[in-house]
Amino acid sequence: MKKRILTGDRPSGKLHLGHFVGSLANRVKLQDEYDQYILIADVQAMTDNFENPEKVANSVRELVLDYVAAGIDPSRSTIVVQSMVPPIAELTVFYMNLVTLNRVLRNPTVKDEIRQKGFGDRVPAGFAMYPVSQAADITAFAANLVPVGADQLPMIEQTREIVRRFNQLYGETLVEPEALVGEFPRLVGTDGGAKMSKSLDNCIYLSDSSEEVIRRVMGMYTDPNRVRATDPGKVEGNPVFIYHDAFNVNKEEVEDLKKRYREGKVGDIEVKQKLAVAINSFLAPMRTRRNNLESNPAEVNRILSEGTERGRKVAEETLRRVKTAMKISYQF
Ligand code: TRP
């Protein structure tokens, strides 16, 4: 039997090239080798969007379009909507007794996010508890592996602790997952900043039109020390060349551009024009898949309802086993 993997996203707007490089590309690759579940974590998204639930709700279908555009095949990957799987919420309640308040608040990812979001001393309890609900996500689907970026490692560690505690208290029941830390390169923003981030407006989205891509690429940062096209330029760490390496399949062209850039024999305009062409051909098959699905809303419904149904069955079975282990599986 194939090993099961679970990945998840909080729905909160469209996905960009950074998401693709960092996780979607990997999911597309993994969907053959593994039994892949992808969780649209709308309940988790609520923990920091509860004042704008419509933002979360509106992103659910958009996420499906992004997934399919990126190459995720719903017949091979099961796409599940978290809020429609009540057993996840029930497991969360049971698991909350298996962690201490201090332990959740010490979770480095939670700590960072609390700081970033500026909650101050008004941290919503639901937000602080989200690692517990993530443990419920992972165990509900009995995932063996969870592909993660470095920032999510503490979540897996916390899940493993909960699983061990559960199994020790109530008997071997839950699957202890392992993190699958792949090569998840983080893509710099168009401004050369550490990563693409919606709030910094330095993203190229999978759903951008070709005009939009051209506009964003032409506005990219390059070597800040290069004033004229005849100045020798620096290729390393230069966002336009990082993108050329990531998205331009014409390696000869990339090498030629790098060489001429170092020698001061090519202008930024040409480098960027060629980059825009490369990114647009990279996105072209995604646009086709997106357009096909977008014109067929019933198909989006089918993907969401069939995936969620399949996921719910698995989660219900886990909950049943959990209640049996806890000896609260009453027969009234
Ligand atoms: N916390 C993850 C993020 O913010 C999303 C997520 C929710 C998730 N549930 C998950 C990831 C389960 C992996 C497994 O990106």
Image (tube, rainbow, N blue to C red):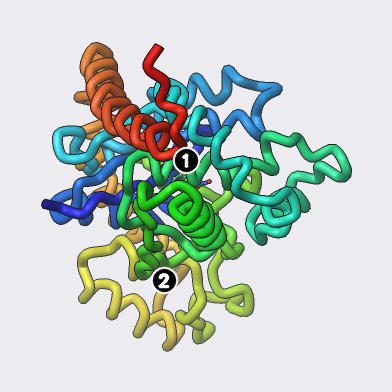
Q: Could you classify mark 1 by the number of other residues whose Cα lies within 10 Å: few (under 14), some (14-19), or many (20 or more)?
A: many
**Rendered view: 260 above or below 31:** below
Dot 2 beta carbon under 8 Å from ligand 1: no
Between 42 and 261, the one lying in front of the other is 42
Residue 107 in the figure: left or right of residue 243? right
Please, what secondary structure does the residue beneath circle 2 have? helix
Quarter of the image for residue 176 reads: bottom left
Q: Earlier in the sequence, mark 1 or mark 2?
A: 1
- Provide the residue designation for mark 1: 136
For the point 24% across and 27% down, the residue is 310
**Cα distance, mark 1 to mark 2?**
41 Å
Question: Comparing marks 1 and 2, which lies closer to the viewer?
Answer: 1
Which x, y percent locates residue 326? Answer: 46, 37
Between 95 and 70, the one lying in front of the other is 95
Which x, y percent locates residue 301? Answer: 28, 16
Between 308 and 28, the one lying in front of the other is 308
- Provide the residue designation for mark 2: 241
